[in-house]
Image: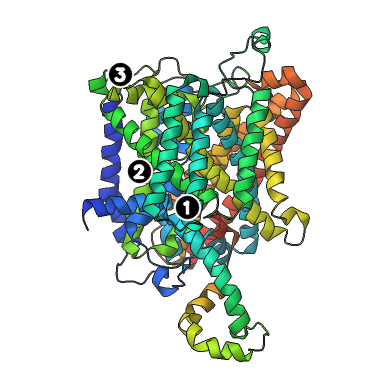
Amino acid sequence: MGILDRIREVVEGLTVHGQSTAILKVKAQIDNLFMIITVGDMLGVPILPPYYSLRLLPYVFPNIQNWKRYMLRERDFTDLVT
Amino acid sequence: MLNTPAPYILLGLVLYFLTYRFYARWIDKKIWETDPNRPTPSRLYFDGVEYFPVSKYVLFGYQFKSVAALGPIVGPLTGVLFFGWVPALLWVIFGNMFIGWAQDYSAMMMSVRNEGRSMGPITYKLLGDRARKILLMYLIFYLIIITAVFEWVIIDVLNRVPGTFTAVLFVLFGGIVFGQLIFRMRMDVLLATLVALLIVLVGYFTVALIPATQWPTTNFLDSPEFFTQYGFNPKLTYPGTLTLMFWLLVLSILYYIAATTPMPKFLLPTVYVGYLPSIIALVLILLAALVTPITGLTIQQQAIKNLYIDPMANPQGGPIWPILFVTIACGAISGWHSLVSSGLTSKQLEYETDALPVGGGAMLTEGSVALSSIAAIMVLSQPPAGAAAYVQGASLLTTKMLQVPEIYMNILYGIFVVVMGLITSMLFVRVFRLIMAELFEDSPLGNKYISPIILLIVAGFLAFVGSWTNLWIFFGGTNQLLAGLALLLVAIFLASVKKPAWYTLIPGGFMAITTLAALAWETYVYLLYALQNKPIGVQAAAAKLYGGAVVQISNFLSAAFGALLFVLGAVMAYYLFTGFAKYRQKQ
């Protein structure tokens, strides 16, 4: 990686990276709502999967492990600092 | 040559480099034994939202942005004014060399080795629930103090560098426009950035070239007669004035919007646009400090001043130990950094070996910001009190280097200080709101629209009536105590995994004892003046305007905060020392 690429990445970290992470969290909140409605029973949420959830299952399947890990992760007030 | 700042700044930079190259690398290899092949939480717990690997260069920039605020700017200049440039320089250099980088790096590594958990869960795991709750209470009061002091520093620059507010308005406007262009109009980031930068430049040159836009002027809402009647300097910022109240209201509105709107709409685009000119300002001042033998600027400040300041003679100071070590916080060491290191950065570290350049490297780079702040104050013969001194010194250094009219650099560094302060203080109010929502879920205190108001009222009152230097020392005390506690927590973790812990235990113990002493001293000063119903320094202006009782209430409140923070900090330190002894015994 050249010196200009490194400088570009440092500037990206200084300016944009925090914003990207915040946007990912906002997107995750919206996605989570959809996932809870469709496959919430996988987290123990007592929602009986409707017919359409089963039809959508092949499409959400690749993300299920990551999603479960995100939803069930321990959270703390010191996570709110950043 | 030796009578210019350059050799001392260069010495600091060289020592930082050697620290990174030898001492830090040795700790990284021999104690933590980092392994680039060992999976980090970003890979093990990948979720695409918070846990995902990021390049170390991006993380370095992000870590630096998150930790560098007003601390490395205001702290060093205050330290120089209190005790002389030699003690200040020595603490910035050696503090960072042996303690500062070690805290940032170690907190990050501790989090990486604990599944990316932040300080709260790690405290819970090592010390139990009671320690975690004490940490939470400590953080709440810490946020109040830090918001109050940042408000004062920002207002001091807005008040004493006319035109800064107009220029900052353009920065905020540029941020809002950038956010709208990106999210609503889906414009390309580079193009939107150019539009935002254009707005910032229009503001900058408008203020620099048109004197009528250099408004509001200093103390514009207060009558000159008030200052002459009581012998106050009309060019300084005083507690209790109408101008101060005006600026507090303006800041409160900004903070409230930042705390209650979604981050991508206001806060983050503003951070993005505000940081672009700040990078230029940072680079310029460091270069300017190094070329002082060519520009001919010499050291004007005393090498060593008072080693002890009697609180009744001058309450805005104290004995060199412990006050120097809390006056200069970020730049030498800062507890806030441990929260940042274990907050998001550790979750996105691609390789374990990236922790050193990201955590340690960012802190040593922040040390260079502190060095440039020392250089800025060194070249002033009669520096004004407060953050405006930094603006004046930085303008002098860079004006001589670039050979441009001073107004351009005045505005640039005015923007720089205000933006650096705003970026972080807007985040404090937001974090306070989120913590209150966690603690008081079902109560109005946890309501997202009510809790920021609580913070803004309490912090605003302290800033409105308080003595800023004493507030700054309070902030330093609480911040540095958090650093000491973080270092001791790392020592416990290292003991629990049977690794040597001396390199964090000794600094952690030193910081805990020093900061508890500083908090005790400051509480004593506030109580002394409250009991005698005397204003501290600049509080005299508030006393003249509203009577001594208001000032007395403020000082009693500050003393109460200090006592509470001392108790919470002492209890945490006790848990940490006994926890370490327990894990050490198990070995």
- Tag 1: amino acid: Leu
Q: Residues within 10 Å of mark 1 (few under 14, many from 20)?
A: some
Residue B120 x/y as whole percent: 57, 60
How much space separates mark 2 and mark 3, taking CA atoms?
Answer: 24 Å
Count of residue discs: 3
Of the residues under marks 3 and 1, which one precedes in the sequence? 1
Of B114 and B497, nearer the camera is B114
Of B367 and B525, nearer the camera is B367
Residue B80 visible in rendering: no
- Tag 2: amino acid: Thr
Identify the subunit bearing mark 2: B
Residue B503 x/y as whole percent: 39, 51
**Residue carrying label 2:** B365
Q: Secondary structure at mark 1?
A: helix
Residue B291 x/y as whole percent: 25, 26
**Residue carrying label 1:** B181
Reply above or below: B65 against B247. below
Which of labels 2 and 1 is toward the front? Answer: 1
Q: Secondary structure at mark 2?
A: helix
Q: Residues within 10 Å of mark 2 (few under 14, many from 20)?
A: many
**Residue carrying label 3:** B297
Identify the subunit bearing mark 3: B
- Tag 3: amino acid: Leu
Find residue B192 and name its label. none
Badge 2 and badge 1 both on one subunit? yes
Of B513 and B252, nearer the camera is B252
Residue at 68% of width from left, 58% of height from top?
B437
How much space separates mark 3 and mark 1, taking CA atoms?
Answer: 44 Å
B105 lies left or right of B450: left
